[in-house]
Amino acid sequence: MLSLDNIKKSKGAKKNRKRIGRGNASGTGTYSGKGQKGQASRSGVSNLKRMGMKKQLLQIPKVRGFKSHRPKNQVVSVKAINNNFKDGEVVNVQTLFDKNLVSKTTLPVKILGKEKLTVKVEFERVSLNATIREQVKDQIK
């Protein structure tokens, strides 16, 4: 009958690690399997370099550039504001999200465009480009 006390590992499932540098009788004494002298026999040399993989490592392209930790602005055009908002309404992240002009409420929003703003709306917690800021100086909270 099979039970936890008589289960054994199958043959070859467990292999003892090689004990390096434990005297000549161990089979890997004296130079500890590193050969004589040279860079590869010193400490701190990668095994990959010893195995001739340095060329392969150098062929792999490095990840270059810089990735900012700040989130990118969600862009909304002035044309979209003119089409979707009426006079007196408030433009903030939540109202833009409700009208499907932005995809997330957690990311910052910037209103861009060179068109003229035809509706009189109030902007809250959204950044504006210079041309729109001039048009609505007194409406920004």
Image (spheres, rainbow, N blue to C red):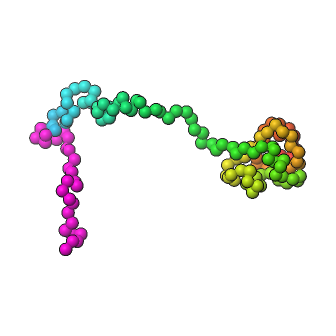
Residue 45 drawn in magenta: no
Q: Nearer the viewer, residue 136 or 82?
A: 82
Q: Taking 94 as reference, is 126 above or below it?
A: above
Q: Taking 64 as reference, is 98 above or below it?
A: below
- Main SS of the magenta segment? loop
- Horizontal side, residue 71 vs residue 85: left or right: left
Image coords of residue 24 (percent x, y)? 12, 38
Task: Report the residue at 71% width, 50% height from top.
Answer: 102
Image coords of residue 95 (percent x, y)? 77, 55
Q: Nearer the viewer, residue 101 or 26?
A: 101
Question: Is residue 133 something one can see in this rendering?
Answer: no
Question: Is residue 121 something one can see in this rendering?
Answer: yes
Looking at the figure, which quarter contains the N terminus?
Answer: bottom left
Q: Residue 25's quadrant in the figure?
A: top left
Q: Residue 42's quadrant in the figure?
A: top left
Count numbered badges in the picture.
0
Residue at the limit of the structure toward the left, as seen here? 25
Task: Report the residue at 83% width, 49% height from top.
Answer: 83
Image coords of residue 70 (percent x, y)? 63, 42
- Horizontal side, residue 137 vs residue 6: left or right: right
The magenta stretch spans which residues?
A: 1-27
Q: Residue 41's quadrant in the figure?
A: top left
- Horizontal side, residue 62 vs residue 75: left or right: left
Residue 5 drawn in magenta: yes
- Horizontal side, residue 13 vs residue 100: left or right: left
Task: Report the residue at 82% width, 52% height from top.
Answer: 84
